[in-house]
Amino acid sequence: MAAASPRPVLRLRGGLAVALAAGFGLVAMGWPLLAEPGGVLTETTSGPWLFALLLPLVTAVALVQLSDGGMDARAVAMLGVLSAVVAAVRPFGAGAAGVETVFFLIVLAGRVFGPAFGFILGNTGLFASALLTGGVGPWMPYQMFASAFVGLGAGLLPGRAPASRGGRAAELAMLVAYALVASLAYGLMLNMSLWPFVFTQGELAYVPGAGPGENLPRLVAYTLATSLGWDIGRAVTTAVLIALTGPVLLKVLRRTARKARWL
Amino acid sequence: MRRAHPVAWWGWALLLATAASRTGNPWLLALIVAVSGLVVTWCRGDEPWSGAYRVFLLIGGTAIAVRMVFYIVFGGADGATVLFTLPEVRLPDWAAGFRLGGAVTAEGALAAAYDGLRLATLLVCVGAANALASPRRLLRSMPAALYEVSVAVVVALSVAPQLVAGVARIRRARALRGTTGRGPAHFMRTVVVPVLHDALDRSLALAAAMASRGYGRAAGIPSRDRRATSAMLLTGLLGLCAGAYALLGSATPAPLAWSVLALGAAAAVFGIAFASARVPHTRYRTDRFSGRDWAVVASGAAAVAGTVAAAALDPGALWPAANPVSMPPVPPVAAAGIIAAAAPALLVPSARTAAAGRPA
């Protein structure tokens, strides 16, 4: 056991569970655009509530399957400490519009410790922060789910730890580009998931059963009016934070991963 | 006497939120806010999270305000009584021809206010659960199959205060050394990196301590059981996915889509329960669900039952029309159900009176 890695392994069954969870999450968040006119979801008003309740179940199933057979104590301790760091830096972003201080940590940790770790850290980090601040709301399942996939994606990026100076620069550039894409996608998905809750009438509201042709312009207008500034701010701050702190933090995290191997 | 179980509080609050989501009647919504406020002021303790209710009240107020501003700028329901008129801009057709500004009517404003109040009430119910349920006790009630993940969250909750202490210690050391450099790069090198190193090294020490006590040991679950668990969990996920996609389209009949979704959810829940039963971890002082906790949940269910009964008797009263402007009626059955949801204030001992009654 001495030389084992603290990285939780993404096995076949875990990968399958995560892929299925992603498929469910796509419906749970994107249903306002995906639902066909005349489909079952457009006939009822309970759709969004149903998904908000089922999403934690799906997340729990994916987590059970990922930690199947027991997780290493080092992975558990590292997850706990990094979740605490996530919870501690999150309030720094809450005051200013669009400043998001969570993702750069999840992306960097996912890169170093692998996709399974990134997925679990996205969940535990936001959950711990919500518990610490008493901020468990209807938005939390969606946030946990989406940030879990941000961490997972960071772990799936290609390439190993680079040894040369050029390799390190290329790795950093790749992480920055990934962070930009991932934070914009995160903003869009969260927007879509909360949209039918927030407005039920008016020109920005989701029209049940109207089809994507009618709803897409409304979603775009809603995004422009409410959250585009936030989304761009989130993408920019995440990218800048990764570019600034990435070299040091990657070194710190890799050193810990190396040390943990000999514990 | 012990406080009520956190799962009971969450069940109560979510049932109350369900009742709120089933009505647009401002009297009922205000009654729900009042009931949750009464129970929170009566039953909450002095823990750090007990102040969450006030924060959620503020968030709810913001939701109403945002809803009103959006109604005024982007329009909504129309009516006959014009309050005032804003300069109107019509966007071109490629921008979907939205209207900005224009007449603000009393009927539209009322409809927007009802809508905002409903969302605010839902948020306030969740805030009540945040204020009442202890997150630490809640984590102890996580299913055993999520044991490692919940241990990680418990570690996070206890490490976070230590991080703050770590920052203070390192800053003091920096000041004693006479380091006065400013700027983000310097801050990074002399504060952030040491704090992070400190925390990560501590996590390794913690991991060693946990490993020596048998935590995180690959538990001896037979591979046959693990395969059975996986099969159940994956079938459940597959069912949930298939059900969700069937709900999107119009090709599948509704009852079939709902039953596939329900079967998937049942398989997933059963899979988690099956996996939990196979985890050979023992618990110190298990947190049992007592009769009083069931009563708390039942009082929340009374509110939902009240709105369901009222919907059967007089559906119009639950969704009062904002056009024309009129005083909405109070459906007595629904109101009685919501008032019954205040029962926890009588059932659960107040933490403050308990503390006051104790001899000093």
Image (cartoon, coloured by chain):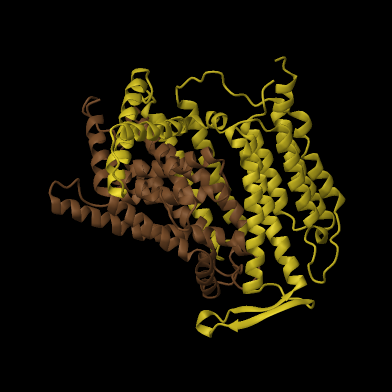
Chain colours: A brown, B yellow
Residue A210 vertical position relative to residue A31 in the rendered view, above or below: below
Q: Quadrant of residue A125?
A: top left
Residue B165 vertical position relative to residue A167 in the rendered view, above or below: above
Inspect this view and state whether residue B35 appears: yes
Q: Can you name the residue that lies furthest to the top here?
A: B359
Residue A203 vertical position relative to residue B281 in the rendered view, above or below: below
Q: Residue at 51% of width from left, 80% of height from top?
A: B95
Q: Looking at the image, which is closer to me, B130 or A188?
A: B130
Q: Residue at 66% of width from left, 72% of height from top?
A: B72
Q: Residue at 55% of width from left, 72% of height from top?
A: A218
Determine whether, in the image, residue B146 is placed left or right of residue B290: left
- Dividing the image into 4 quarters, which one contains the N terminus of chain A? top left
Determine whether, in the image, residue B211 is placed left or right of residue B233: left
Q: Looking at the image, which is closer to me, A252 or A157?
A: A252
Q: Residue at 75% of width from left, 19% of height from top?
A: B357
- Residue A106 position, x and y percent, is 36, 46
Inspect this view and state whether residue A68 appears: no
- Residue B98 position, x and y percent, is 58, 79
- Residue B5 position, x and y percent, is 64, 29
Tell how many labels: 0
Determine whether, in the image, residue B51 is placed left or right of residue A254: right
Residue B178 vertical position relative to residue B186 in the rendered view, above or below: above
- Residue A207 position, x and y percent, is 61, 69
- Dividing the image into 4 quarters, which one contains the C terminus of chain A? top left
Q: Looking at the image, which is closer to me, A155 or A40?
A: A155
